């Protein structure tokens, strides 16, 4: 019997290739018409611009194994992601850095002075109970109100006081002029797009790929299933639906340049969208080749039954429901749940690949010993 991988995103592609290269027959199915999952990219037929169909995806990592892996399957072109923010009628750079701080407060401070200045602004909160208190303890009221309060409310559809403090994971300020959004050693985008990279990963011995195919339609008996679709969907939502945020995209075509940057965040609460992305800037090596430009306004909202899930909410109610689904999964034989949707976690692409490679290592060891793979290689 062969193995089945459900989902042709990065998790599924890596696991399928590992199995195929080890001599095992694999069927990969995906109900969409393309490979790559939500990092799918394609040439826009009207403008010719390489487009991140489900929103921007920037590859960044410091993991040497992951970097070595992706460079096997794609030409990775250097790309340093920078984000511009519009807040309270001003234009600033993100993450918060020394330029942002000096511009916002109309000062000319060096690093030490800026540190002391921000320290004088923060609230003394020993144990922040929510996102807002965490932000006030890190940066003070003015920066929080300008850059985070409205944007966070739009992105998550709730008050920052209802979000856990952990959502704000690290100090969101730099006391130098470094405006690079990511700090990882490798930052790049595949020159041919992510879908081409996924296609190359899946171009492996013993691997059959079947698109426009729902797993529920299959009648074949498999040795084991690796499921990277939504965890609750596998069980027919019998316990209820896990909460997600989704995105709506408003397409805009213009001549020349529209905004002069890949991403501009709109932080004010009275602006209904969260950001505008201009996609030719995600491929700076070719951005001057086009007469037209393609942009999208992004609107965040709660995901409905027919929507594409983007961000797991993971608040108290979802955590309780998640534990119940985990118990169901652990009682289900011959199925392992992997990836962002299968484990109900937000994952960057490098972490997705790192976890899929680690799962593949363990999987092949278990198969060699005649043992069954676990329900989860990584606990949700």
Image: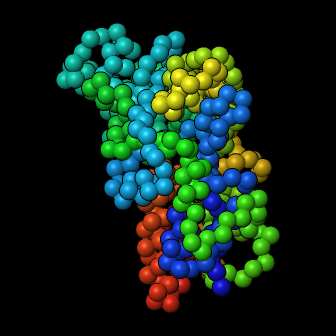
Q: Is residue 158 left or right of residue 213?
A: left
Q: Quadrant of residue 247?
A: top right
Q: Quadrant of residue 118?
A: top left
On-image quarter of the N terminus = bottom right
Residue drawn at point x = 62 percent, y = 19 percent: 291
Residue 79 quadrant: top left
Which residue sits furthest bottom? 370
* Closest to the observer, 5 or 70: 70
Give the number of callouts: 0
Q: Position of residue 237 (x, y in %)?
A: 74, 63
Q: Where residue 357 sits in the image (x, y, percent)? A: 45, 66
- Colour mode of the rendering: rainbow
Q: Which residue: 58% across, 62% down?
A: 202
Task: Return the x and y of residue 5 as percentages of the image width and height.
Answer: 63, 69
* Closer-to-camera residue (25/338): 25
Among all residues in the image, which is located at the extreme top?
106
181 with respect to 22 (left or right): left
- Residue 257 visible? The answer is yes
Residue in the image at 30% along x and 10% along y = 107
Q: Is residue 318 visible?
A: no
The vertical placement of 22 against 129, above or below, is: below
Please indicate whether residue 337 sits to the left or right of residue 134 in the image.
Answer: right
- Closest to the observer, 13 or 202: 202
Name above or below for residue 104 compared with residue 9: above
């Amino acid at each position: 019997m062969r193995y089945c991988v459900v989902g042709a995103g990065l998790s599924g592609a890596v696991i399928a290739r590992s199995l195929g290269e080890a001599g095992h027959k694999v069927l990969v199915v995906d109900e969409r018409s393309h490979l790559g999952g939500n990092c799918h990219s394609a040439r826009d037929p009207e403008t010719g611009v390489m487009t991140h169909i489900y929103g921007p995806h920037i590859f960044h990592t410091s993991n040497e194994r992951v970097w070595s892996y992706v460079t096997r399957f794609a030409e990775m072109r250097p790309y340093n992601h920078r984000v511009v923010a519009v807040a309270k009628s001003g234009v600033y750079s993100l993450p918060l850095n020394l330029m942002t701080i000096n511009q916002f407060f109309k000062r000319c401070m060096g690093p030490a002075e800026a540190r002391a200045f921000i320290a004088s602004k923060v609230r003394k909160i020993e144990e922040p109970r929510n996102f807002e208190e965490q932000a006030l303890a890190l940066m003070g009221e003015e920066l929080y109100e300008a850059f985070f309060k409205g944007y966070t409310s739009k992105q998550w559809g709730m008050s920052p006081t209802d979000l856990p403090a952990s959502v704000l994971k690290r100090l969101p300020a730099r006391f130098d002029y470094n405006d690079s959004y990511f700090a990882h050693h490798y930052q790049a985008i595949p020159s041919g797009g992510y879908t081409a990279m996924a296609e190359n990963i899946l171009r492996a011995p013993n691997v059959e790929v079947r698109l426009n195919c729902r797993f529920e339609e299959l009648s074949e008996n498999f040795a084991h299933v690796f499921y990277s679709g939504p965890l609750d969907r596998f069980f027919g939502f019998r316990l209820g639906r896990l909460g997600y945020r989704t995105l709506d995209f408003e397409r805009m075509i213009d001549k020349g340049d529209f905004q002069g940057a890949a991403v501009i965040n709109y932080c004010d609460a009275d602006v209904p969208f969260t950001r505008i992305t201009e996609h030719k800037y995600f491929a700076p090596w070719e951005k001057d080749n086009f007469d037209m430009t393609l942009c999208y306004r992004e609107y965040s909202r709660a995901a409905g039954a027919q929507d594409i899930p983007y961000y797991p909410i993971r608040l108290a109610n979802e955590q309780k429901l998640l534990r119940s689904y985990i118990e169901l999964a652990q009682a289900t034989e011959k199925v392992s749940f992997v990836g962002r949707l299968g484990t109900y976690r937000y994952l960057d692409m490098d972490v997705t690949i790192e976890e899929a490679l680690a799962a593949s290592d363990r999987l092949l060891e278990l198969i060699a010993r005649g043992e069954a793979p676990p329900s989860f290689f990584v606990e949700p």
